[in-house]
Image: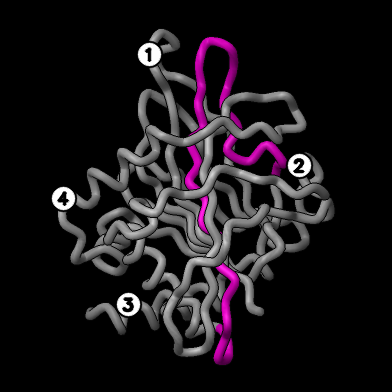
Amino acid sequence: MNSIDSTISLATTLQTKGFAFLHGSETSALFAEDIMPDDWAAFAASWDDLKTDEYMADGGRYRRRRFAVYVTEPGGPISRAAHQPHYQARSYNQLNGGIERWFEPITETTSMNPAFTALLSTSRALFDRLAATPAWHIEAHQFRIEAGPGGAGQPTPEGMHRDGVDFVLVSLIRRQNIEQGTTTIHDLNGQALGSFTLTNKLDSALVDDRLVFHGVTAVTPTDPALPAFRDVLVLTFRKI
């Protein structure tokens, strides 16, 4: 199956189920088939330079992140927007919503890395198939969730939730010395639809945020004496 056929098949799955899980090899074939090893290594290493999330209403210091916004016009290129705050209504994020959160920006080097641009552009091509001539507001989040002797790390401290967008891509970059971190998908009535764990590089979850809720269980260290973390890239697409 070629990449166009794969994209059509994946779009159909999202339309019918509201979510899809891709193994890393499938993601690589679809999103990153031309990524060189040196580009990927630099992209993954950029997670070592994330900044502590100072907006955690639970007082936690287990999350590091960087953030950027991109915009498109129908059929036009993806352009980086001026740096701006991330905002979610409290109806979508009861823990941290309702305020403007100014996170450190994704560096320009990371933004231009071929691994990042491949994930961004191919996600856009996929989601274009699910929306009529869309212009997109795209938010990119680099997350590191840390776990240690002081407690578990919470990938989704707000619990089972929607993001208030149209579509979401979550791709695993790296996980080290952790257990758990299982993604669970529920329909709008709270019925469980499926679960899976992002374990290997580029294992990915795609979500139609209009149709389903998603959440991720806490991560705990396998060996509390060693660094333990879960690195993911999250891309959200909202029609404008």
Given residues 44 and 226, the one toward you in this image is 44
The amino acid on which the numbered mark 4 sits, given as a three-letter code, is: Pro
Q: Which residues are magenta?
A: 131-159
Q: Is residue 35 above or below residue 225?
A: below
Point out residue 112 in the picture as x, y percentages from the top left corner.
33, 60
Q: Residues within 10 Å of mark 4 (few under 14, many from 20)?
A: few
The amino acid on which the numbered mark 2 sits, given as a three-letter code, is: Asn
Q: Residues within 10 Å of mark 2 (few under 14, many from 20)?
A: some
Q: Are marks 4 and 2 in contact (CB under 8 Å)?
A: no
Q: Is residue 25 above or below residue 105?
A: below
The dot on residue 37 is: 4
The disc, 3 or 2, on the residue closer to the chain's N-terminal end is 3
Q: CA distance from mark 3 to mark 2?
A: 36 Å
- Give the image's coloring scheme: one colour
Q: Are marks 4 and 3 in contact (CB under 8 Å)?
A: no
For disc 3, the marked residue is 6
Give the side of residue 75 with respect to residue 84, left or right.
left
Local secondary structure at mark 4:
helix
Look at the image and tell me in which quarter the C terminus lies. bottom right
Residue for point 50% across, 54% down: 234
For disc 1, the marked residue is 226
Q: CA distance from mark 4 to mark 1?
A: 26 Å
Given residues 170 and 239, the one toward you in this image is 239
The disc, 4 or 1, on the residue closer to the chain's N-terminal end is 4
Q: Residues within 10 Å of mark 3 (few under 14, many from 20)?
A: some
Q: CA distance from mark 4 to mark 2?
A: 37 Å
Q: Are marks 1 and 3 in contact (CB under 8 Å)?
A: no
The dot on residue 96 is: 2
Give the side of residue 160 with respect to residue 174, left or right.
right
